[in-house]
Image (spheres, helix red, strand yellow):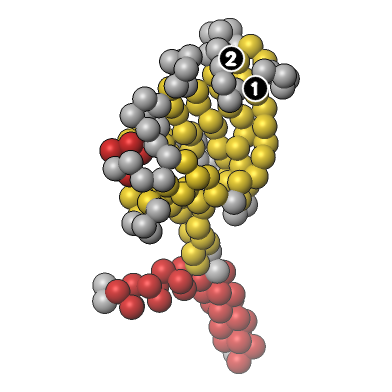
Amino acid sequence: MALAFLLVAIAIGVGVSTTFDTTDRTLVVETEDGETIVSEPVDEESDIRIEYTHSVEKTPVIQHYTIEETTLVLSHSEFRSYGAGLPSTASVERTDEGAFVRQIDEPRERIVLRPGETAGHTLVVDDEEFDLVSLSEGSTVEIELTERTVIDMVRERGTNGD
């Protein structure tokens, strides 16, 4: 009987420990003065994109990001024409729709950009769109992936009085 009780206690302890070690990943966008303007939960299946209009060519550019464990990765870039700042010597593929796609697969600790009216920078997380131009009010923004465990979230809730 004591052995059965011990085994149940160990099983519960392992389950609770595993639950509290679960990591919550959040894509956070902050302005240069530290204001959080976007905070979206994400996982390795999330579709993350930065979409904008090329300032010279006036054609759409889409940067596609993935999450690999705890890192944001620029997986590929999609564009409609060559222009200043777009790859002209890199290997690209052409889609049936006429877009050029460049495979990149480059880890990014953070993304720093200055949303502009002409470019119309938009962050897309899954199907949710965030107009970075209006949200940032002209401020430079930093986009990064943060991670918190369930224990971190409970601690934050306790200090915030929630």
Name of the residue lying farthest toward the bottom: 2
Q: Which residue is mark 2?
A: 82
Look at 60% across and 81% down and name the residue there.
Answer: 10
- Going from the N terminus, do you reach mark 2 or mark 1 first? 2
Name the foreground residue: 149 vs 120. 120
Q: Amino acid at mark 2?
A: Tyr
**For residue 50, above or below residue 92:** below
Quarter of the image where the N terminus is located? bottom right
Classify residue 58 by image quadrant. top left
Q: Position of residue 48 (x, y in %)?
A: 49, 37
Q: Amino acid at mark 1?
A: Pro
From the image, tell me which residue sits under label 1.
87
Residue 39 in view, yes or no? no
Q: Position of residue 106 (x, y in %)?
A: 67, 40
> Is residue 141 visible from the viewing direction of this image?
yes
Residues at marks 2 and 1 touching, judged by CB atoms closer than 8 Å? yes
Residue 73, horizontal then vertical, whole percent: 61, 42
Q: Quadrant of the C terminus?
A: bottom left
Residue occupying image coordinates x 39% and y 37%: 115
What is the spatial separation of the Cα atoms under label 2 and label 1, in whole angstroms?
A: 7 Å
In the displayed structure image, the side of residue 161 where residue 128 appears, left or right: right
Q: Quadrant of residue 83?
A: top right
Say which element carries label 1: loop
**90 lies above or below 146:** above
For label 2, the SS is loop
Q: Residue at x 64, y 88 (%)?
A: 3
Residue 81 picture location, percent across and down: 55, 12
Q: Residues within 10 Å of mark 2 (few under 14, many from 20)?
A: some
Q: Which quadrant holds residue 66?
A: top right
